[in-house]
Amino acid sequence: MAARGKAFVASLSGTSLEYYDFAVYGTASALVFPQLFFPGSDPLTGLLLAFGTFAVGYVSRPIGGFVFGRLGDTLGRKRVLVSTLMLIGVATVLIGLLPTYATIGVTAPIVLVLLRLAQGVGVGGEWGSAVLLSGEFGDPRRRGFWSSAAQIGPPAGNLLANVVFAILAATLTQDQLLSWGWRLAFLLSALLVAFGLWIRLTLEDTPVFRALQDSGSTSATPIREVLRTQPRGLIAAILSRLGPDVAYSLLTVYVLSYATRTAGFERAQVLAAVLMGSALQLGLIPAFGALSDRINRRLVSTIAVVLAGVWVFVLFPVIDSGSFGLLVLGVVVGLVLHAAAYGPQAAFITEQFSPRLRSTGSSLGYTLAGVLGGALAPVLLTSLQAGYGWAAAAGYVALACVLSAVGLAIGRDHDPREDEELAAAVPAGPAEPAPGRP
């Protein structure tokens, strides 16, 4: 397999695994963790506490972004990707082995939060280097397509996680699911870790990073440099992610509890709707990434986030209708719009920073946006809907989409020649440094 093709697969497989782990946790937070780790007389309180631990995974992402993002610019993308894969894989397996509140009391939710913290650190450190792995091996003039490999990871991981939970929900009783069935979803990640490590260990680092190393142009203090010299790019990166992050939390996590608790749908019905939308995203995300290589990627993403901000006001009423067909329509259309915004996003964010600061800048933008967006989304959506109704929750999502449109407006368009010149400086070798078309 050509190096650029292997890099695409390595980026896709690793982020799919890590988002499988993340999505399994999110699904479990909505369906089983309130009873197992946060028992109480008020189901809403248990749900909020479970979503609070879900948020910990987002809040801890900046730690991964600061630590591993910096290492990606100083030690290389490949080393970071091997380390983050191991971290999140081990944490997820341990969650699958963790005794519940009924067995060890308050120690159970405490350890759960710590393992969730480790998951978040791993995901926060993964994304920046995963995007660069595929993007810097590929043609810089087609970065929208090549960088979308990492973007396919969330829906692929979410699809796999929901397939697993759908199978468990269909084949097990509620008592079996709560007793031991949920653990299987977490323990499966051990197999995926082995595959991800194998593919990543066979790759060299990217041509761009090797060129920076050969020329002595790597940064000794990349975090300080990003904050001092490229603050506009960082702000643009953070804001551009808010709308898609909040919308994705709504469409894949919060919808599971809202549709079952408020609209009376069966758990399997909601999982089926999310599965359909996630399956479509597997093809749509790289398609929209490729489209952004032909049309200004800021324009493609802006149209998508604006439409997503409008669609959310349709989504809640169609769910409340109680019609399964309308539920599927609402979720699928929402995830199509998310794909249109999300596909070009990896390329847009990395293009806000110079090559020597790309890992750090991209990781910081991604992880800080996760704290402000996805981390709080399930808790805020639950609280707003419970206190003020669905219109308040929809307004929150729409506001996040408006902020993303602002971030896209202030961002810059990238000149691919700076990558081409760096890549051309690397001697020909087994890593196939001269990028080409797929």
Image (cartoon, helix red, strand yellow):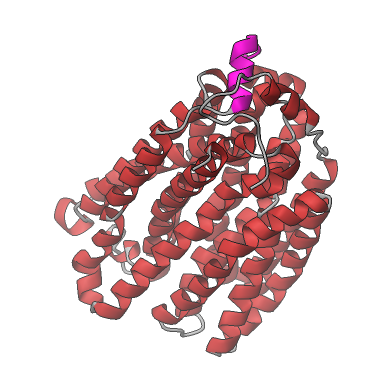
Q: Is residue 34 above or below residue 125?
A: below
Q: Is residue 373 left or right of residue 16?
A: right
In x, y percent, where is residue 348? 73, 43
Q: Is residue 65 above or below residue 146?
A: above
**Where are the magenta residues, as a range?**
207-220
In x, y percent, where is residue 175? 21, 75
Q: How many marks?
A: 0
Is residue 415 one of those drawn in magenta? no
34 and 173: which is toward the camera: 173
362 and 9: which is toward the camera: 9
Is residue 218 one of those drawn in magenta? yes
Q: Is residue 265 above or below residue 42?
A: below
In x, y percent, where is residue 34? 34, 63
Q: Is residue 333 left or right of residue 200?
A: right
- Say which quarter of the image contains residue 302: bottom right
Q: Is residue 293 above or below residue 257?
A: above
- Say which quarter of the image contains residue 303: bottom right
190 and 208: which is toward the camera: 208
In x, y percent, where is residue 124? 51, 38
Which SS does the magenta portion mostly show?
helix
Which residue is most to the top?
216
What residue do we see at 51% from left, 52% from top?
153
What residue do we see at 71% from left, 74% from top?
313
Q: Is residue 376 visible?
A: yes
